[in-house]
Image: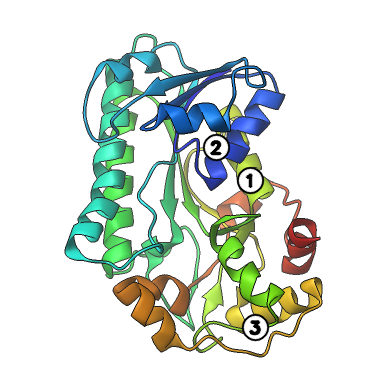
Amino acid sequence: MKVAITGATGFVGTRLVQRLHKEGHQIIVLTRNTTSARRHFPAQTFANVEIVAYTPTTSGAWQDVIAGCDGVVNLAGEPIAEARWTPEHKREILNSRQLGTQKIVEAIAKANPKPTVLVNASAIGYYGTSETTTFDENSPSGRDFLAQVCQAWEAEAQKVKESGVRLVILRLGIVLGLGGALGKMITPFKLYAGGPIGSGRQWFSWIHIDDLVNLIVQALTNPQLEGVYNATAPNPVRMNDLSQTMGQVMNRPSWLPVPGFAIEALLGDGAIVVLEGQQVLPKRALETGIKYQYPNLQPALQEILQ
């Protein structure tokens, strides 16, 4: 296949490019920072990777490279839990997803020949937060800021169907691997200062990075996959269980809780991402017969941390 990818130098995108490269596919990396992309994917190692500069929220010549691709994977978006949600940062979070997806869909509409599939990221933030409700793909959307972002993001992706292109939307849970959210949690445990964040009762709906990459590859290659899928493992856990399991796997204590106010001081409204969770099940992936390499947390953490 020939696949164009946005967000390819990110935590998930890098692993996806490595997998597709290993399988012999041609990859177009659409990136704002070509220097960084060349560091990630040096030409001598990644001979079948083409790096193309693009401005995600602006139409331009970059859109021409979509013609002749078999599939497009759109993972780009401003990080959500890395900084305080000032009004400006909230605009960036929304625009990077809504406008970024709009420009990808626009490029697909212009393309001749067109790709057959768009795999578009979304997030389980779509459902809002709850300690008691279980969500699957049929659950209604929430009403908070992140839910509104996900709705706007997905609405832009839906327009690709007007071009006769198959659409798969993956609502990503918290992706576990060396990096991302887990990367930030490892350090306190290494320093014997690990423990649950906030109340510890909030749900943590996670997915191992290899299972997520497998789901993306399935979405690209299996014409039966269409519509919305929760990209989460089938066994979400509460934050207390996560920290306890991390402690066991790393052979470290896990009793030192991180108070919610400390996270709120750091992230403001953005603290909702870690202090309030949602229990999200991958009902459609399981019905489709998708196999998880890491359906349970402990083996997933052992693979990553040991």
| Vertical side of 285 occupied by 165: above or below | above
Q: CA distance from mark 2 to mark 1?
A: 8 Å
Q: Position of residue 205 (x, y in %)?
A: 56, 67
Residue 16 visible? The answer is yes
182 or 239: which is nearer to us? 182
Query: As shown in the figure, which amino acid type bears the numbered disc 2?
Result: Leu
Q: Position of residue 37 (x, y in %)?
A: 49, 30
**Residue 291: horizontal and vertical position, in percent?**
73, 48
Q: Which mark is residue 193?
A: 3
Q: Secondary structure at mark 3?
A: loop
Question: Label 2's element?
Answer: loop
Q: Is residue 204 positioned above or below 116 on the image? A: below
Identify the element where label 1 is drawn: helix
Give residue 288's mark.
1
Residue placed at 30% from the left, 29% from the top? 105
The image's colour scheme reads rainbow
Specify the farthest residue to the left.
Answer: 87
**Which amino acid, by three-letter code, is at mark 1?**
Thr
- Asked if the residues shown at circle 3 and circle 2 are in contact, with their CB atoms under 8 angstroms apart, the answer is no
Q: Amino acid at mark 3?
A: Ala
Asked whether, in this view, residue 117 is left or right of residue 244, the answer is left
Check if mark 3's residue and mark 1's residue have beta carbons within 8 Å: no
Q: Are marks 2 and 1 in contact (CB under 8 Å)?
A: yes
**Labels 2 and 1: the sequence-earlier one:** 2
